[in-house]
């Protein structure tokens, strides 16, 4: 780790950890959606919306702290990127739940549960990784595993698309379901973006 002669603002670490913990909450709501009937989904969507708003608040708090801090723990552009990318994850998860409710989707296609399981695991890994930003230790396995999970998510997504276009669903249903699985895929991509940014930060700080 690079030796520093100046103190650093450390509250960013706690705010990144809080943002990642909120993403875990969102991933649990996605899992809950899988086992819920249509009548319970609106309430889950409300809780997801509240979690998404909490994520927005956490992101804005990081930006405010960034704008008011003379000394930061690592590069300002990396702090901005990491905060924005964490917020993107929550936005995509909330969008997926909202689409399921708005489109009144009765049954999600087989394979969506695998997408959500990948997201839940990536959320856990991300939440576990954020406290390690303080020391930049024990992060390599995190970004390697998240990248592996994103590759797995790509494969699941492709299989889901093949399933949707196999002629079982009518055209309107395909459009609705495809939008949901595409947004879940974007969430997986967003986890990889966070992992890549963490890797970039760790390399700069080494």
Image (cartoon, helix red, strand yellow):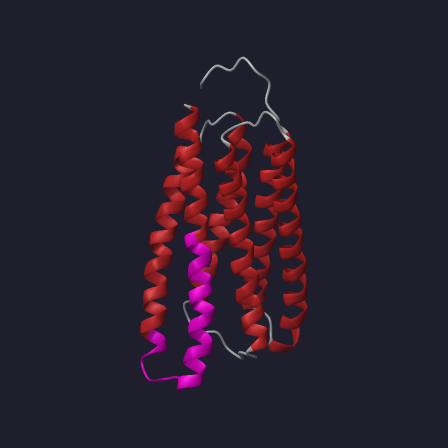
Q: Nearer the viewer, residue 134 or 36?
A: 134
Q: Nearer the viewer, residue 48 or 61?
A: 61
* Residue 183, horizontal then vertical, whole percent: 46, 64
* Residue 79, horizontal then vertical, whole percent: 52, 37
Q: Main secondary structure of the magenta part?
A: helix
Q: What residue lies at 45% left-to-right and 71% top-to-bottom?
A: 179
Q: What residue lies at 54% left-to-right and 73% top-to-bottom?
A: 100
* Residue 165, horizontal then vertical, whole percent: 33, 78
Q: Is residue 166 left or right of residue 182?
A: left
Q: Is residue 109 visible?
A: no
Q: Which residues are magenta?
A: 163-189
Q: Is residue 136 magenta?
A: no
Q: Quadrant of residue 5?
A: top right
Q: Is residue 178 magenta?
A: yes
| Depicted 170 relative to depicted 125: above or below | below
Q: What residue lies at 40% left-to-right and 34% top-to-bottom?
A: 200
Q: Is residue 31 left or right of residue 191?
A: right
């Amino acid at each position: 780790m690079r030796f520093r002669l100046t103190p650093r603002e450390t509250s960013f670490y706690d705010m990144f950890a809080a943002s990642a913990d909120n993403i875990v909450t969102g991933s649990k709501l996605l899992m809950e959606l899988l086992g819920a009937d249509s009548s319970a989904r609106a309430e889950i969507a409300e809780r997801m919306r509240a979690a998404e708003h909490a994520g927005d608040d956490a992101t804005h708090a990081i930006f405010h702290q960034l704008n008011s801090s003379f000394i930061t723990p690592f590069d300002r552009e990396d702090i901005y990127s990491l905060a924005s990318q964490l917020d993107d994850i929550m936005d995509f998860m909330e969008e997926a739940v909202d689409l399921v409710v708005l489109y009144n989707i009765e049954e999600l296609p087989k394979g969506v549960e695998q997408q959500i399981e990948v997201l839940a695991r990536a959320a856990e890994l991300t939440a576990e990784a954020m406290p390690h930003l303080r020391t930049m230790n024990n992060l390599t396995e995190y970004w390697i595993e998240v990248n592996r999970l994103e590759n797995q998510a790509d494969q699941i997504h492709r299989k889901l698309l093949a399933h949707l276009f196999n002629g079982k669903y009518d055209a309107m249903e395909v459009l609705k379901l495809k939008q949901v699985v595409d947004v879940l895929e974007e969430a997986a991509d967003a986890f990889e973006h966070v992992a890549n940014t963490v890797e970039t930060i760790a390399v700069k700080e080494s």
